Amino acid sequence: MLLQWSDLGAALAIVCVIEGMMPFVNPAGMRRLLGRIAAMTDRELRFGGFLTMLTGVVILYMVRS
């Protein structure tokens, strides 16, 4: 499977749109969420990051197969 740079660019653009939605729609909620994230331990953050990556891999597998 050959990497298509346009696919990578599209994926990054979608990430930017999704990441920007919450602070645009609900800035106060975003501040609360960031405060809660800042209070988490490193272990909790790593576990959350792992689950997010795993979810992304599963979604990518489902979309590409």
Image (tube, grey):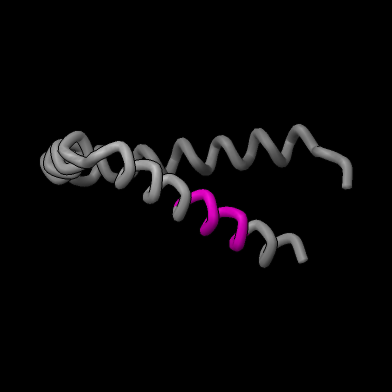
Where residue 28 sits, quadrant-wise, is top left
Asked if residue 4 is positioned above or below residue 47 in the image, the reply reads: above
Determine the residue positioned at 46% across, 36% down. 16
Residue 59 spot, x, y in % from top left: 59, 61
Q: Main secondary structure of the magenta part?
A: helix
Q: Is residue 54 magenta?
A: yes
Q: Which residues are magenta?
A: 52-59
Is 53 left or right of 24, judged from the image as shown? right
Residue closer to the observer: 26 or 32:
32
Residue 26 spot, x, y in % from top left: 18, 45
Residue 52 spot, x, y in % from top left: 46, 51
Q: Is residue 56 magenta?
A: yes
Determine the residue positioned at 39% across, 49% down. 47
Determine the residue positioned at 55% across, 54% down. 56
Considering the image in quadrants, where does the C terminus appear?
bottom right
Is 28 left or right of 24, judged from the image as shown? left
Where residue 33 sits, quadrant-wise, is top left
Q: How many marks?
A: 0
Q: Residue furthest right?
A: 1
Residue 53 spot, x, y in % from top left: 52, 49
Where residue 34 sits, quadrant-wise, is top left
Residue closer to the observer: 2 or 51:
51
Residue closer to the observer: 16 or 61:
61
